[in-house]
Every structure is written in C-alpha cells, then in structure tokens.
Amino acid sequence: MKPVFKILPHFSLLLVCAVLFAALPRAASADHLMPKDFIADLGDRAVRALADKSLTHTDRQEKFRELFLEGFDVRTLGRFAVGRYWRKATKSQQTEYRGLFTEYVVQTYSSRFGQYSGEKIKVTEQRPVGKKDALVKSTLVRPEGAPVSIDWRVRERKHKLRIIDIIVEGVSMAITQRDEFASVLRRGGGDFEVLITVLKEKIGEK
C-alpha cells in the first residue's frame, strides 16, 4: 500500500504538512472565523512554524499527531477512506481502525516537516458546497515553479471548523486514500481485518 500522496508532486506533501503543523485552537472555532479565514490563518501559521528547525524527530511526530487531530475531521476522513466496507466491520474493528488510521497518517507524514522551502498559501475565495460544507479556493505560491491550485473542503461540526478534504490540481486526497484502502480490501475479499493487519504492519505494530 503506497502512501496516498506519493502519486502527487512533491509540493502536495509540503502543503498538507504545512497545514497540519499550523493548526491551533484559536483557528478551529467557527464562532470566530469564516472557512476562508480559517484556511488563511492555518497557512500563515504554517509558514512561521515550519521555519523552526529545532524540533527533533520525536517532537515533530508528537506535534503532528496533536495538530492532525485538531485541524482535521479525523472520524470523517477515516470512515470515508474505507467507504462501504465500514458497515462490514465490527464495532471493535471500527474502534481499532480509527486509532491505526491516525497513527498511519502521523508516521507517514511527520517526517516531511523539514522539507519546507518557502511555499506560501494565498486564499482567494470560498463558496458553499451542499448544506454543510464550504469549498475554500487557494493558490500555493512557490519560490520556483508555477503556482498550484488548492481547494479545501471545510465542514463545521459542533461549532468548530475542520478540514475533510484537500483537492490538489483537481485530485482529491480523500478519494485517493479511499481508492488505496479499497484496493487492499478487495484483495482481501472484503475482510476488514485484512486492512487492519496491513495498517499494523505499516506502523510497526505486531
């Protein structure tokens, strides 16, 4: 199972890590920020945070875990990633999977923090999507190379804003992850335990 962002250019890794690193409690309150301001705030904080080269690998991983849980709707992302197979899992498997999904993302991408090289996020607009979400459009401005179009799907849940998808040049991160997990599950005959086993192997659990 390849990491979800491996199929995309290197800038997408930097972008996702930047936003995860930047999320702070103040930015998560829908009572104070509109979706576009929420994303702009995260981008500004990312630039400042990624300039800090003093973090150890362990500190980076712990910070990543904390901010991933805070800035993204992990429950929605994890469930979407397994699609219809979610209903085939037992309650025990669902609980175990949620923990493994979070750890998989943390371990896979925490090491990418040190790769920041001057990218900045310029938020341009937002528009409603359905009844619950907003799509925030932005541009990733790079020191070298053409700008990159980034859309953020943001949802308010219990008066807090959370990111539920990132679309890089038209490619949905959530859908890409779901396709990868679905491939694992299909090869395993739809047995949810197969995905749990693969995730455990990926994060080094026995």
Image: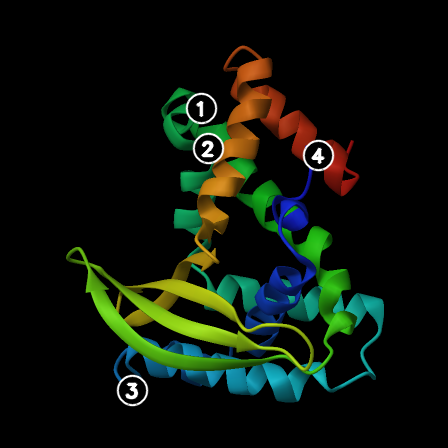
Q: Which one is nearer the viewer's eye here, 193 or 156? A: 156
| Picture residue at 47% right of the left edge, 67% below the top | 149
From what the image shows, is residue 182 above or below residue 172? above
* Precedes in sequence: disc 4 or disc 1: 1
Query: Which residue matches tag 4?
Result: 200
Foreground of the two, 144 or 164: 144
First-in-chain label (2 vs 1): 2
Tag 3, which secondary structure?
Answer: loop
Q: Which residue is mark 2?
A: 82
- Residues under labels 2 and 1: Cα distance? 10 Å
Mark 4 vs mark 2, CA separation in Å: 16 Å
Residue 21 occupies quadrant: bottom right
Residue type marked 1: Ala
* Amino acid type of the residue that numbered disc 4 sits on in the rendered structure: Lys
Q: Nearer the viewer, mark 1 or mark 3?
A: 3
Disc 4 vs disc 2: Cβ atoms closer than 8 Å? no
Rendered image: mark on residue 89: 1
The residue shown at (44%, 24%) is 90
In the rendered image, the quadrant that contains the C terminus is top right
| Residue beneath disc 3 | 32
The image shows residue 198, relative to residue 18, as above or below, that is above
Please rate how many residues cluster around mark 4, counting C-alpha atoms within 10 Å: few if below 14, some from 14 to 19, many from 20: some
**Structural distance between the alpha carbons of marks 1 and 3:** 38 Å
- The color scheme shown is rainbow
Q: Could you tell me how far apart the alpha carbons at marks 2 and 3 are, in whole angstroms?
A: 33 Å
Residue 102: x percent and y percent? 58, 50
The reply to whether the C-beta atoms of the residues labelled 2 and 1 are less than 8 Å apart is yes
